[in-house]
Amino acid sequence: MPAFFNGIFGMKSTPGIVPLDGHIPVATNYKTQMLRIGPMCRFAEDIPLLIKVMGGEKVESLSLDEPVSMRKLRIFYMEGIDDVPLIPPLSWDMRRTLRKVGTYF
């Protein structure tokens, strides 16, 4: 979400694809399981190319060039983020639309 709030696109990469080498601060123990490095870019269509560059040989396991069925996607969403500073609560119309999209998938 931080990328989205700044008008760009970002992607949290799949675990183990983009190496954590050189990341500061160094993640140790369980934190290495939570930390992900991924691309941030101006256009969403640039994300696959950047993942390919950042991930190197490990990217083949992602099948980035295969077509994706929208019906097989799993979507996570939250409705209860009403008390966060600088983020306005969802309007009823937005909440209803969000639920409608959720039933599509």
Image (cartoon, grey):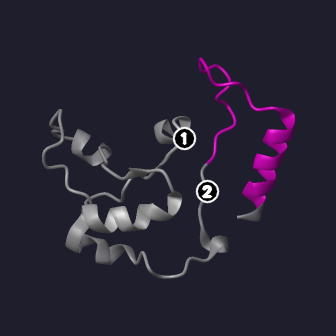
The answer to whether residue 15 is magenta is no
Q: Is residue 84 left or right of residue 53?
A: right
Whole-number angstrom distance, CA of label 1 to CA of label 2: 22 Å
- The residue type indicated by label 2 comes to Ile
Residue 67, x across and y down, in percent = 54, 81
| Location of residue 88 with respect to 38 vertically, above or below | above
Image quadrant assignment for residue 95: top right
Quadrant for the C terminus in the image? bottom right
Q: Which residue is mark 2?
A: 75
- The residue type indicated by label 1 comes to Gly
Q: Which mark is residue 70?
A: none
Count up the numbered dots.
Answer: 2
Q: Which mark is residue 7?
A: 1
Residue at 56% x, 77% y is: 68
Residue 77, x across and y down, in percent = 63, 46
Residue at 31% x, 44% y is: 34
SS state under label 1: loop
Residue 45, x across and y down, in percent = 50, 64
Q: How many residues crowd around disc 2 within 10 Å: few (fewer than 14), some, or many (20 or more)?
A: few
Residue 23, x across and y down, in percent = 18, 41
Residues drawn in magenta: 77-103
The answer to whether residue 88 is magenta is yes
